[in-house]
Structures are given as structure tokens and as C-alpha cells.
Amino acid sequence: QVQLVESGGGLVQPGGSLRLSCAASGFPFSTYDMTWVRQAAGKGLEWVSSINGGGDMTRYIDSVKGRFTISRDNAKNILYLQMNSLKPEDTAVYLCAMPGASSWLDLERYEYWGQGTQVTVFS
């Protein structure tokens, strides 16, 4: 069965850094595109970043460009999100997800989702 388990969230001050991890299992990880999505309290899902299976193509929402880096270790079946220069508006539950046949931005059609890890940016 497909499983996506996020970790690495926590409380950090503005300007700080966190690295999120998503441990994937149950599917051939290296052949699938992967995505980070976030959901702030009381708000809808927001696409953050995606990476192709080989890890050589990435995209980001404008608000995180230059601050976040998505990457993956296909040998370990782990997806990462390095988050630097964190801002209070980055506070959200961060989820990893697998688009499957959908386009990266079409969250409504995604096939699999993790449970999420909380990131709180607060002084």
C-alpha cells in the first residue's frame, strides 16, 4: 500500500530554517513525480513545490522561490523540503503528495497524500 509519512516540522522563529522529510513506500518512488502542499489553519490546500522522478526538474510557488528547495533521495525513497528564511505566513501543515497522472498544480486530482507535519513560524 502506498504510504507517505512526513516529519521534520516544528516551531521556528522568523528567518529560521527547517528541513521536512517524506518517507515513501508502496510504490516505485523514483518513477513518480512528487509534491509538497501546505494548508494553513482554516484555509484550503496550497501547492508549494513539485519535483520530477529523476529530481532534475523542479517548480515552486512564487512566494517560496529562493527560500525553499525541494529534493529527493531515490535510493532512500525520501522526499525533502529545505525551508530557509521562514516567514510567519509559511505557518501551515505541510503534506507530501503524489500527483499520479495529474498535472502538478491540479491538487484535486492527486492520487495519494501524507498526513502532514506542522510548521509554525512564530517569535
Image: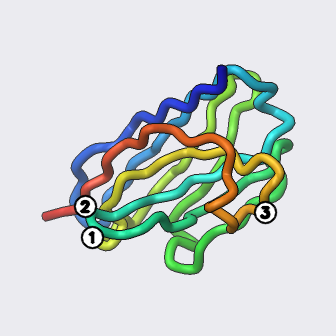
Q: Which residue is mark 1?
A: 88
Residue shown at 73% from the left, 62% from the top: 104
Q: Which amino acid lies under the numbered mark 2 shown in the image of this protein? A: Val
Q: Classify 10 Å Cα crowding around label 2: few (below 14), some (14-19), many (20 and above).
A: many
Residue 96 located left or right of residue 119: right
Closest to the observer, 68 or 98: 98
Mark nearest the camera among 3 and 1 is: 3
| Residue that carries the numbered disc 2 in the rendered image | 121
In the displayed structure image, the side of residue 8 where residue 53 appears, left or right: right
Q: Residue at x 80, y 40 (%)?
A: 32
Q: Mark 3 belongs to which amino acid?
A: Ser
Label 1: few (<14), some (14–19) or many (≥20) C-alpha neighbours in 10 Å: some
Contact, CB < 8 Å: mark 2 with mark 1?
Answer: yes
Image side of residue 108 versus residue 120, left or right: right
- In this view, which residue lies farthest toward the front? 109
Residue 40, by quadrant, is bottom left
What number is the disc on residue 18? Answer: none
Q: Quadrant of residue 90?
A: bottom left
Measured in 3D between alpha carbons, the distance from the residue under mark 2 to the one under mark 1, in whole angstroms, is 5 Å
- Compared with residue 23, is residue 67 higher up or lower down, i.e. above or below? below
**Residue underneath mark 3:** 103
For residue 24, above or below residue 79: above
Percent position of residue 101, x then y:
83, 51
Residue 35 image point, x, y percent: 64, 52
The type of residue carrying mark 1 is Pro
